[in-house]
């Protein structure tokens, strides 16, 4: 479908005409929760049109306090005891077709507001808007480009069994580590081509694709642009990839560490900052040399990425990826075109000078991951910090400086006042409450490792 046919103007009148012209039957109104899970309502077209002239669609506030299990952190001090509704208002610029349904269906991402019209300050999309707004108040505009890794795995309905590698077009299951292997990527062309078709139909702009080091592990690179737009696209892409894989009897998973002994999956976020006054990248001088702002930004990441770790690696599984024998970063050293560092400055000209945060997991909520990395850099700019010396060796030889597990990461976030000030204290408290609830639920589970090694040996 041509883009001009698929992209309605963000105006209620033209949106109504677009919905009727395309015979849209229903509209899925989507709200990302703390984990980036899609919550919301499916609304018949005419009811959706009426809601555009009303006060939006109502959803209970507790959706932002649900964990990955669906349980709710009712004990949070941020939760309103009246279990009130919030208004979710469609951002019409995000209205897209849903390409995998037989019946014409649209999807739209919504912003959330309290009854008094103020944004819901603990809604992830609001948090990212807040951070972008703080940049704008300083005359700056952040630009990001995510790279998202994921695995295709075989269908498996038993959570006690390890995940398997799917059979590709070759009729075989891939083995070994075939990073950037063209033929190995081609083995999943039927899934990838469908992903591209779905993305084109729903305005998700994928730049390049590559095979990563794990079996049936792929990476999609997004074009650079506005953080909210790129977070929206990443949010929608995860569902898109899952749907395409499902059509071919596979599962696309964004778990940080789905296979024991194989590489984990990351979300690498490239970020640069542009002056609103003249459009100049503040990280570089015209002659190509580094500007002081680049070093201050890197210093902010070095200082605050560990404290923001729970926003980059938000699940118990996330920390299995951050280990000495992994290709994933284990610290926040920075280097020039050095992929062993948590913070990498790729070789680039002055217009595209940027920092890549390589710590973030594929299982992160894209809105919160982007908000947190931009927040750390912003505090670094404000504080005019100086970074540690650039690293020119393998950073894995320099030790671990990141939190080892989720409770430690949550404690560090809880104690970090500069990040709370940028992200919003009520959001930080709500996020911590949801994640501590999830940790308690996880801690009730007795694993197969415990049964294997403790049952008869202790």
Image (cartoon, grey):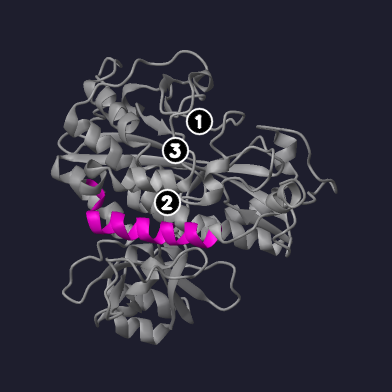
Of the numbered discs 3 and 2, the one sitting upstream in the chain is: 2
| Whether residue 24 is visible | no
Which residue does the image show at 41% across and 77% down from the upper left? 19
Q: Where is residue 137, by image quadrant?
A: top left
Return the x and y of residue 425 as percentages of the image width and height.
23, 54
Total marks placed: 3
Return the x and y of residue 154 as percentages of the image width and height.
74, 55
Q: Read off the magenta span.
A: 422-442
Q: Secondary structure at mark 2?
A: helix
Membership of 434 in magenta stretch: yes
Q: Secondary structure at mark 3?
A: loop
| Whether residue 4 is visible | yes
Determine which residue is flagged by label 2: 366
Q: Is disc 2 surrounded by few (<14), some (14 to 19) or many (20+) residues within 10 Å?
A: many
Membership of 283 in magenta stretch: no
- Disc 3 versus disc 2: distance between alpha carbons? 20 Å
- Give the dominant element type of the magenta stretch: helix, strand or loop: helix
Determine which residue is flagged by label 3: 403
Disc number for residue 329: 1
């Amino acid at each position: 479908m041509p883009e001009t046919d698929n992209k309605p103007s963000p105006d209620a009148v033209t949106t109504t005409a677009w919905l009727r012209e395309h015979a849209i039957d229903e509209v899925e109104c989507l709200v990302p929760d703390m984990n980036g899970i899609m919550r919301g309502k499916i609304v018949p077209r005419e009811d959706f049109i009426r809601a555009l002239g009303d006060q939006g669609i109502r959803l209970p506030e507790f959706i932002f306090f649900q964990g990955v299990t669906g349980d709710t952190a009712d004990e949070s001090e941020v939760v309103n005891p009246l279990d009130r509704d919030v208004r979710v208002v469609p951002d019409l610029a995000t209205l897209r077709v849903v390409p995998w349904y037989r019946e014409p269906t649209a999807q739209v991402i919504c912003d959330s507001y309290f009854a008094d019209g103020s944004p819901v300050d603990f809604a992830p999309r609001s948090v990212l808007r807040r951070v972008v707004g703080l940049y704008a108040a300083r005359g700056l505009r952040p630009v990001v480009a995510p790279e998202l890794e994921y695995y295709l795995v075989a269908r498996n309905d038993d959570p006690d069994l390890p995940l398997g590698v799917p059979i590709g077009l070759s009729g075989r299951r891939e083995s070994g580590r075939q990073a950037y292997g063209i033929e190995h990527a081609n083995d999943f062309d039927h899934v990838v081509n469908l992903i591209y078709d779905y993305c084109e139909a729903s305005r998700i702009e994928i730049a390049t694709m590559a095979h990563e080091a794990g079996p049936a592990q792929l990476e999609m690179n997004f074009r650079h642009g506005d953080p909210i737009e790129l977070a929206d696209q990443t949010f929608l892409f995860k569902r898109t990839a899952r749907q395409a894989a499902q059509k071919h009897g596979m599962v696309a998973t964004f778990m940080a560490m789905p296979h024991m002994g194989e590489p984990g999956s990351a979300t690498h976020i490239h970020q640069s900052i542009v002056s609103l006054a003249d459009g100049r990248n503040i990280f570089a001088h015209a002659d190509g040399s580094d500007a002081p702002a680049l070093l201050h930004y890197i210093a902010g990441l070095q200082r605050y990425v560990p404290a923001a770790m729970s926003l980059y690696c938000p699940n118990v599984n996330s920390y299995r990826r951050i280990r000495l024998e992994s290709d994933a970063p284990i610290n926040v050293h920075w280097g020039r075109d050095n992929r062993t560092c948590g913070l990498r400055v790729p070789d680039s000209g002055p217009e595209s000078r940027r920092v890549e945060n390589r710590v973030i997991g594929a299982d992160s909520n894209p809105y919160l991951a982007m908000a947190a990395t931009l927040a750390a850099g912003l505090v670094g700019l404000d504080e005019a910090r100086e970074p540690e010396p650039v690293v020119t060796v393998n950073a894995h030889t320099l030790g671990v400086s990141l939190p080892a597990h989720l409770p430690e990461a949550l404690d560090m976030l809880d104690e970090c006042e500069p990040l709370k000030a940028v992200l919003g204290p009520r959001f930080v408290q709500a996020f911590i409450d949801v994640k501590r609830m999830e940790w308690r639920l996880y801690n009730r589970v007795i694993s197969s490792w415990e049964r294997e090694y403790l049952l008869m040996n202790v």
